[in-house]
Image: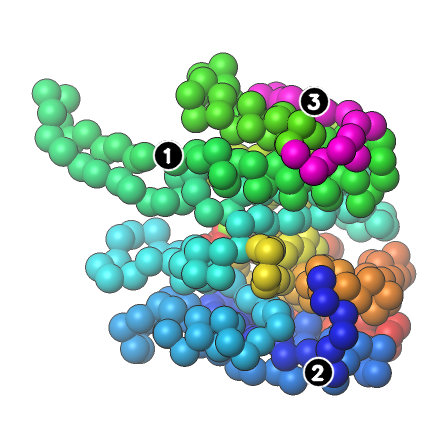
Amino acid sequence: RTIARTKLRIGMIPADGVGREVLPAARAALEALGSSIPKTEFLDLDAGFEYFTKKGVALPEETVSAMKNDLDCALFGAVSSPSHRVVGYSSPIVALRKAMDLYSNIRPVKSVSKTPGERPSIDMVIVRENTECLYIKEETMSLGPNGKEARATRLITERASRRIGQMAFETALARGSSSLLTIVHKSNVLSVTDGLFRETVRGVPALPGVDGKYDAIKVEEQLVDSMVYRMFREPQVFDVAVAPNMYGDIISDAAAALVGSLGLVPSVNAGDTFVMGEPVHGSAPDIVGRGIANPLAAIRSAALMLVHLGYDGPAKKLDEAVDSVLRRGDVLTPDLGGSCTTDQVTAAVLKEL
Ligand code: ATP
Ligand code: MG
């Protein structure tokens, strides 16, 4: 968090699908903040599957070097993930998280209105490990007595578990000294990998330098299956949940369903030196090109990015504008039961701002 800036240089990486439709909304919302944040400079950057099909690379070197050298932060849209294997292609978002060491993915999930499908009084943050687990994508295929044998390697390290654990305790502390932190794992089956994850996260309060600041935080554990069950039964009890990469991804989509739509849930990919906002949803191939993608997750991701840069006040303005559009409920995209377009919802947010 460094606040003394005269300019805010923001990389814009719309990438694929509805990412291209929702990122302009986030940009317009940031611009509408005017002088309450430093003067914004936007830099458009390439990445994605579409770019790959044209140029043969999914994440051009210029995008990474701009992020490393020229930018304060970035916003990412979404990537299409082809369901079949495409030779030479690997997900640019995974590569970008790695290149910038964005080791945590922070996903607040909150209900604010009576939009269709929303469960009331949910207010939780999912802290997802962002660099390892099954996402190292080490898969092999061999031939055995039962035919083809496919294997995937799942990597859990002490360092990554400690870093995400620290991020989770800090997130919990920021929400009040007696917050609840739920560690999500499956160590009854994967006692070595998930065992290391839960032990390491549990050990964070005893690390040197912590000096008891997490003492009042209540820590509990949930096996991932029971976590999903409890999230559907009584989502209101959760506060901050920390999980390895894959479980974190799955419980986030489940949480999004509880607040009405994936089109509402923001995230930031955060490391120690860089932050990148990114809506939790994917490229939404079923609605792409129709101008009806919900822009609110992208706008909230811009707000969350500002929080991580130290601009809490302007971020709150963005969040309040989004919340009041949701509460009014007359200008909504179809995922929330409305019949408005991306542009109409964006205009409603800008009007609130
Ligand atoms: P990907 O592989 O890119 O994640 P996907 O098929 O999993 O693609 P998602 O983008 O994850 O698609 O979306 C899942 C569902 O949520 C789809 O029905 C999609 O239309 C819907 N959805 C996602 N984002 C939005 C949005 N911004 N507005 C409205 N609906 C959305
Ligand atoms: Mg998806």
Q: Which residue is located at x 44 percent, y 75 percent?
A: 65
Circle 3/circle 1 CB separation < 8 Å: no
Separation of marks 3 and 2 at Cα, in angstroms: 42 Å
Locate residue 185: give its quadrant: top right
Q: In the picture shown, does residue 341 fall above or below 194? A: below
Q: Is residue 202 left or right of residue 82?
A: right
Name the residue nearer the viewer: 323 or 243: 243
Q: Which residue is mark 3?
A: 220
Quarter of the figure that contains the N terminus: bottom right
Q: Nearer the viewer, mark 1 or mark 2?
A: 2
Q: In the picture shown, does residue 148 fall above or below 168? A: above
Quarter of the figure that contains the C terminus: bottom right
Residue 34: in sight, yes or no? yes
Residue numbers of the magenta segment: 208-228
Label 2: few (<14), some (14–19) or many (≥20) C-alpha neighbours in 10 Å: few
Separation of marks 1 and 2 at Cα, in angstroms: 41 Å
Q: Nearer the viewer, mark 3 or mark 2?
A: 2
Q: Which residue is located at x 49 percent, y 25 percent?
A: 196
Q: Which mark is residue 74?
A: none
- Quick one: label 3 or label 1, which is nearer the N terminus? 1
Q: Which residue is mark 1?
A: 154
Q: Which residue is mark 2?
A: 7
Circle 1/circle 2 CB separation < 8 Å: no
Locate residue 136: give its quadrant: top left
Q: Is residue 163 left or right of residue 123?
A: left
Mark 3 belongs to which amino acid?
Glu
